[in-house]
Amino acid sequence: MATRRPATDQAELDEAAFAGLLKAIRRNRFLPVPPDERNFVGDGDFLAIGCEFLRHFVELGALATRDRVLEIGCGIGRMALPLTQYLEAPGGRYTGFDVVSAGIEWCRDNITQAYPNFEFLHLDFNNELYNPDGRLTDQGRLPFEDESVDFVFMTSVVTHLDPGYTAFYLREAARLLAPRGRLFATAFVLDGANRSLVAAGKSRPAFYLDGAGPHYIADRAHPMAAVAFDQDWLLTTARGAGLTLQRPIAYGHWSGRIAENFQDVCVFQRAKAN
Ligand SMILES: C[S@@+](CC[C@H](N)C(=O)[O-])C[C@H]1O[C@@H](n2cnc3c(N)ncnc32)[C@H](O)[C@@H]1O
């Protein structure tokens, strides 16, 4: 007769299998990585950064293999690429959109070709830095059904948005998430400790705290190059949209704190319907 494995052993086995998967993805030379000249999303090891976030999505955001996933601001597939090895079709599927059409083209040609449960859309929202001539604004609506996804994520995107767009995506994430759905978002969040560190010149980027807020910028010539948000404003806006923090914010080391992540990680869940 088969003996039932204690739950802790199973959890350890799952953890070991997941660590093995991450290692295998990092070593997988057949995964398409965009050439440097097409990469507009940042420096560093493209695949390693994607794997680091896949680990955060699972460990902090409870991403499951059969989840329906939406990525806001998917760039050139840095997060999508490792996800192709984790999400299991037919239940598990991914949609990513971005305002830069060249990134979407690359993802369609190189990811959707091999993984049809991964789709990419170009949506022409304007952004002073990434898409200055974009015709869509934060007054629109995303072209997806209510409650149609389990997991929404934005990595290094809120850090390039103004308050209007940030509020818009919080509202839209709340609309699109199914019950128990989660929003995983990285940001530069100004709580009391981070505000003091920024004021003391310890943070990278160095933000200007002299405005009225709720957002602060690092580069006056290019305001959307790096944007930080007042924590109270962010959490109040999320709550107003129907999202509550699922776990304490995992603060990053951008501010000068000692931490593993660079940006702060916020995981929200859809508030219970009344
Ligand atoms: C630093 S990149 C990060 C890309 C991707 N999330 C990643 O981590 O690899 C910032 C991304 O935000 C996108 N973006 C800027 N404004 C946006 C908006 N209004 N809506 C959606 N995406 C936007 C940019 O086009 C760019 O791909």
Image: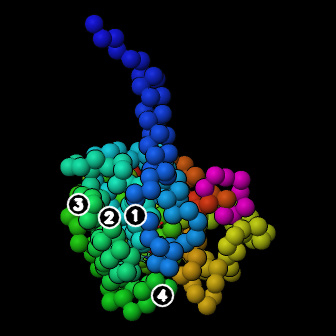
Secondary structure under tag 2 reads helix
Q: In the picture, residue 96 is in which quadrant?
A: bottom left
Secondary structure under tag 3 reads loop
User: Quarter containing ligand 1?
Assistant: bottom left
Q: Which residues are magenta?
A: 254-261
Q: Which residue is mark 1?
A: 32
- Mark 1–mark 4 distance (CA, rounded to whole Å): 29 Å
Q: Which residue is mark 2?
A: 111
Along the line of sight, the residue nearer the viewer: 25 or 245: 25
Of circles 1 and 4, the one toward us is 1
Q: Is residue 19 left or right of residue 2?
A: right
Residue at the location (49% across, 59% down)?
A: 47
Cβ atoms at labels 1 and 2 below 8 Å apart? yes
Quadrant into which the N terminus falls: top left
Q: Position of residue 53 (x, y in %)?
A: 49, 55
* Residue reaching furthest to the right: 200
Cβ atoms at labels 3 and 2 below 8 Å apart? no
- Whether residue 259 is visible to the viewer of this picture, yes or no, is yes
Near mark 4 (Cα within 10 A), the count class, few <14, some 14-19 or many ≥20, is some
